[in-house]
Image (spheres, grey):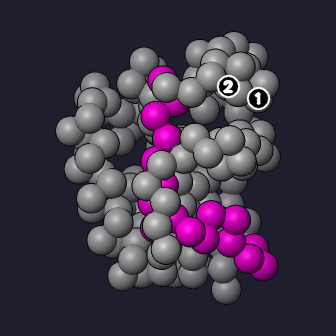
Amino acid sequence: MLVRLLYASRAADRIDEALIASILEQARAHNAAHGITGILCTSSEADVFLQVLEGGRAAVNELYGRILRDPRHRDVTLLDYAEIGERRFETWRIGSVNLNRINRGIILRFSEAAVFDPFGLSGKTALALLEELMATAAIVSRDGA
């Protein structure tokens, strides 16, 4: 059974290129081995993460448990969890979006302010934002998972 999990978290330390590279490197290796796909959005201005994970229920649940215990994250908040018939982000073992580099109008379209705050989004709205980012080619690191 496939599931989609969407969460937000705050970075324990400042988000910088080294931190993002480390997370993406670990995620690509882990996700490929466990059939997980998804997208990681980061905002160094707000030091927050927004991530969607898709895959088998056991694999996604195990990974979410690891994220909850990961010292790089704090205030991990589940925004949405659903059984799904098919993946929406199937071509990304882990896509990446630096939200500081996208048009602020995209953020404003889905939130109250142009400053990104995933904790103020519903799961449905956060998923719509991710789909918009996918449609506008804002997601990088596309691969054939």
Q: Position of residue 119 (x, y in %)?
A: 61, 31
Q: Position of residue 62 (x, y in %)?
A: 43, 72
Q: Nearer the viewer, residue 122 or 134?
A: 134
Residue range highlighted in magenta: 84-100
Which amino acid type is marked by label 1?
A: Phe
Residue 131 is a magenta residue: no
Q: Are marks 2 and 1 in contact (CB under 8 Å)?
A: yes
Q: Is residue 37 visible?
A: yes
Residue at the front extreme, as displayed: 137
| Count of numbered circles on the image | 2
Name the image quarter holding residue 16.
top left
Q: Badge 2 is on which residue?
A: 107
Crowd rating for badge 1 (residues with CA inside 10 Å; few <14, some 14–19, many 20+): some
Q: Badge 1 is on which residue?
A: 110
Residue at x 27%, y 62% (from the top left corner):
26
User: In the rendering, which numbered label is found on residue 7?
Assistant: none
Element marked by disc 2? helix
